[in-house]
Image: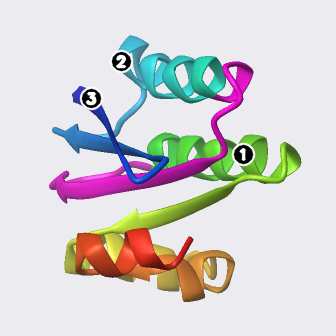
């Protein structure tokens, strides 16, 4: 899994590529977000356009990121979910957590902040 961070209009966009599955690389997602939170950042978009698969551990990590950010009064938006990832959120009933925060267009996601 690769993660590239870019900033646009005070929003941190994390472009994630590869599978989000159990392993050391998953810790990197948490570390990146926690470091940005410590630096005072509060707005995040997780761009999942290049993510073909998320396992249960990966899904748990996305929820951990969401909880960490919201505890610091920040916001997390999801961008470009594949149908598989969307279905996983529906099946796990986590879709209600992100329902208003799922986007298919980056500009719309940025404007939602």
Q: Nearer the viewer, residue 25 or 70?
A: 70
Q: Determine crowd level at label 2: few under 14, some 14-19, many 20+ residues with C-alpha closer than 10 A.
A: some
Secondary structure under tag 3 reads strand
Disc 1 target residue:
69
Cα–Cα gap, marks 3 and 1: 18 Å
Sequence-wise, the earlier of marks 3 and 1 is: 3
Q: Determine crowd level at label 1: few under 14, some 14-19, many 20+ residues with C-alpha closer than 10 A.
A: many
Looking at the picture, how far across and down is residue 51, in whole percent? 19, 51
* Label 3 close to label 2 by CB (< 8 Å): no
Secondary structure under tag 2 reads helix
Q: Residue at x 23, y 53 (%)?
A: 53
Disc 2 target residue:
25
Task: Verify whether residue 2 appears in magenta.
Answer: no
Cα–Cα gap, marks 1 and 2: 20 Å
Residue range (magenta):
37-55
Q: Left or right of 84: which side holds 27?
A: right
Looking at the picture, how far across and down is residue 4, in whole percent? 24, 29
Q: Quadrant of the N terminus?
A: top left
Tag of residue 3: 3
Q: Residue at x 59, y 25 (%)?
A: 36
Looking at the picture, how far across and down is residue 100, in whole percent? 57, 87
Sequence-wise, the earlier of marks 3 and 2 is: 3
* Label 3 close to label 1 by CB (< 8 Å): no
**Comparing marks 1 and 2, which lies closer to the viewer?**
1
Q: Left or right of 21: which side holds 43?
A: right
Name above or below for residue 45 compared with residue 29: below
């Amino acid at each position: 899994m690769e993660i590239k961070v870019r900033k646009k209009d005070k929003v941190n966009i994390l472009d994630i590529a590869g599978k989000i599955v159990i392993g050391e690389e998953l810790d990197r997602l948490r570390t990146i977000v926690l470091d940005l939170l410590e630096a005072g950042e509060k707005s995040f978009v997780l761009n999942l356009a290049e993510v073909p698969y998320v396992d249960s551990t990966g899904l748990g990590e996305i929820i951990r990121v969401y909880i960490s950010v919201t505890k610091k009064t920040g916001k997390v938006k999801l961008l470009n979910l594949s149908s598989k990832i969307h279905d996983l959120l529906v099946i796990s009933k986590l879709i209600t957590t992100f329902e208003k925060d799922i986007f298919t267009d980056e500009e719309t996601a940025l404007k939602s902040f």
